Image: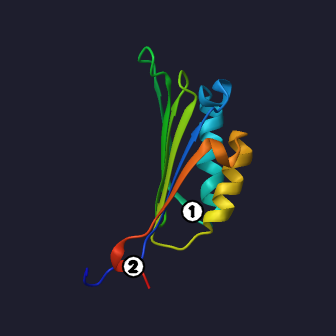
Amino acid sequence: MRANYTKTYHIIFDAFGVAKELLNSEEFALKILLEVPKLIGMKILSGPNLVRDYDRGHEGVTGFAIVDFSHVSLHTFVATQEIFLDIFSCKPFDYAAVREYLYGALRVNPDQVETVEVAYPWEKE
């Protein structure tokens, strides 16, 4: 057991079959990185920062925002129609609300998504 731990809240949201025009849009990536912190009640301290990847076959956008309790990040892959999002915090947030927002924003169904809500062994009650 880890001494003096802080409980963490961590969701990994990986979606497949996302429209290429969304995944190729820096504006769309920026919108996600601005909206998710609002949704989970956190203030952006730095960013969002975006980088476009032009590597042939791996085109997409990578983005990162540092929030007052940790971070929100995303990576898009246009050719394979994938997006990988990570939200990590030391402050509780509503996993269900995040999932519902992302389903709508990405225009995907739950069967197009792999979600992991990370729970570390020392945090189990």
Judge whether residue 95 can be spotted in this image: yes
Judge whether residue 6 can be spotted in this image: no
Residue 40 in the image: state x and y as whole percent: 62, 64
Badge 2 density bin: few <14, some 14–19, many ≥20, Cα 10 Å? few
Instruction: Indicate left or right for 120 with 103 as reference.
Output: left
Residue position marked by numbered label 2 in the rendering: 123
Residue shown at 70%/53% (left/top)?
Answer: 101
Q: Quadrant of residue 125?
A: bottom left
Instruction: Indicate left or right for 97 with 61 as reference.
Output: right
Q: Which of pointers 1 and 2 lies earlier in the amino acid sequence?
A: 1
- Indicate the amino acid at tag 1: Lys
Q: Nearer the viewer, residue 48 or 84?
A: 84
Classify 84 as above or below 57. below
Residue ranking furthest to the front: 111
- Indicate the amino acid at tag 2: Glu
Scheme by which the image is coloured: rainbow
Residue position marked by numbered label 1 in the rendering: 43
